[in-house]
Amino acid sequence: MRKQSQTIYEVTILYIGSLNALRQREPFIVFFSNLKKAVETIIGQLALNGWPIKVNYTAVYRSLKQRGSYQCDFDVAGAKVFRIRIVPQTLNPVLTTMGIDEKPAEPTRKN
């Protein structure tokens, strides 16, 4: 059985701006194996919670190809509230030596 690496998408919601000082929250991170499903989920949650839909599949896809990541900030009355960031990650990467060299042979002792 051959193992292959696969791209998954890390979606992070970062709480930023001056409102974060009042209500500190940890970043929310979720992973998707399908970019279209990730974008659809984001759009659905934005709509459900009353935020403008500033995210679309084409913009995300192009940004990932050109810059390697996508991010979009959301604000209320000019104050930034949160940032959505999407970054591709490799699942099951090809194994490497991880920079570990072969152990040198121990010198033989002369008696």
Image: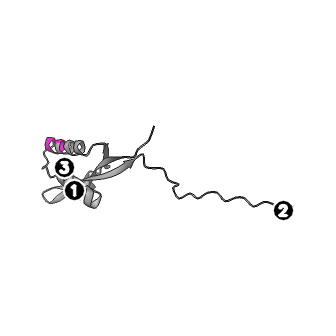
- Closest to the observer: 20 or 105? 105
Q: Are marks 1 and 3 in contact (CB under 8 Å)?
A: no
- Closest to the observer: 41 or 35? 35
**Disc 3 on helix, strand or loop?**
helix
**Disc 1 on helix, strand or loop?**
helix
Query: What is the number of the mark on residue 57?
Result: 3
Badge 1 amino acid: Arg
Mark 1 Cα-neighbour bin, 10 Å: few <14, some 14–19, many ≥20:
few
Mark 3 Cα-neighbour bin, 10 Å: few <14, some 14–19, many ≥20:
some
**For mark 2, what is the residue?**
110
**Mark closest to the chain's N terminus, 2 or 1:** 1
| Quarter residue 80 falls in | bottom left
Image position of 29 (left or right of 51): right
| Quarter residue 19 falls in | bottom left
How far separated are the C-alphas under marks 2 and 3? 70 Å
Badge 3 amino acid: Tyr
How far separated are the C-alphas under marks 1 and 3? 9 Å
Query: Which residue is situated farthest in the right direction here?
Result: 111
- Figure quadrant of the N terminus: top left
Mark 2 Cα-neighbour bin, 10 Å: few <14, some 14–19, many ≥20:
few
Query: What is the number of the mark on residue 84?
Result: none
Query: Which residue is situated farthest in the top direction here?
Result: 1
* The magenta segment: 44-48
**For mark 1, what is the residue?**
62
Q: Is residue 16 among what the camera can see?
A: no
